[in-house]
Amino acid sequence: MDLGSPLPAVDRTADAAAAHEPSRDCPLCPRLAAFRHEQRVAHPDWYNAPVPAFGDPQAWLAIVGLAPGLQGANRTGRPFTGDYAGVLLYDTLAKFGLSEGVFAASPDDGLTLTGAIIVNAVRCVPPQNKPTPEEIRTCRQYLEPPLHALPHLKVVVALGQIAHQSAVKALGGKLPKMRFGHLAEHRLPSGLMLVDSYHCSRYNTNTGRLTAPMFEAVFSRALALRAGG
Ligand code: SF4
């Protein structure tokens, strides 16, 4: 299957993506900026800032998450690092040859991604892990550039419904026509394929809503789509 050219031509370099990263003190979501300030006072040794994308600038696969966890990415500064949600994700990436090194839940563990990149739909930690619709919409300006800057992007995996909705909008798709569902697939206007997954949160894995084989099926499908299947 021909997936077509990756995306409409905009800036397509890693530098261009970096240029569109939010500042550490991004003020655009007042509630999140205030929460970030509270965390800086309470935990001055934590990262406490918008969390940048992590991975390979030549990625064919982009994984879109929801938002940093308070004691995970917000603390460490790397997506899905430092709390439970990262364990299944990084284990699965390793299983499919999409990482090098050993994940040790710390940004200085030396782990690198190969062919994959992770970016959150919302860059700042939200209280109770719940960003508002307005915050999700506002931060989309920092989701679009990193995705559009990937010259070899073929497949996007969205973790959870909010990531799905934000990814669809960021990539020019139509809601509600493209409905979220575990292992649901959508062809975006550019030819990119979007594959949905339940979020790999502690709640979803503890309740059995998402099992390791279910999660692996998502990445297996992503690899098949890349190969033209
Ligand atoms: S969530 Fe995004 S837009 Fe909102 S303050 Fe953080 S970086 Fe800025």
Image (cartoon, helix red, strand yellow):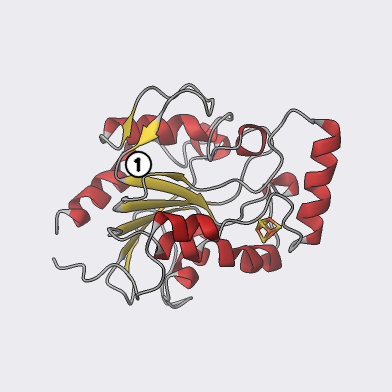
Q: Position of residue 223 (x, y in %)?
A: 22, 48
Disc 1 secondary structure class: helix
Identity of the amino acid at label 1? Met
- Asked if residue 164 shows in the view, the reply is no
> Which quadrant of the view contains residue 11?
bottom left
Q: Please tell me which residue lies in front, 62 or 195.
A: 62
Q: Is residue 221 left or right of residue 40?
A: left
Question: Which residue position is annotated with label 1?
Answer: 214
Q: Position of residue 24 (x, y in %)?
A: 69, 49
Other residues around mark 1 within 10 Å, as few (<14) / some (14–19) / many (≥20): some
Q: In which quarter of the image is ligand 1?
A: bottom right
Task: Tell me which residue sits at (33%, 33%) in the image.
Answer: 99
- Asked if residue 191 shows in the view, the reply is yes
> Which quadrant of the view contains residue 189?
bottom left
Q: How many labels does the image show?
A: 1
Is 80 located above or below residue 149 in the figure?
A: above
Q: In this view, does 139 lie to the left or right of 175?
A: right
Q: In this view, does 190 lie to the left or right of 180?
A: left
Task: Tell me which residue sits at (55%, 57%) in the image.
Answer: 121
Q: Quadrant of the C terminus?
A: bottom left
Is 152 located above or below residue 38 in the figure?
A: below
> Which quadrant of the view contains residue 178?
bottom left
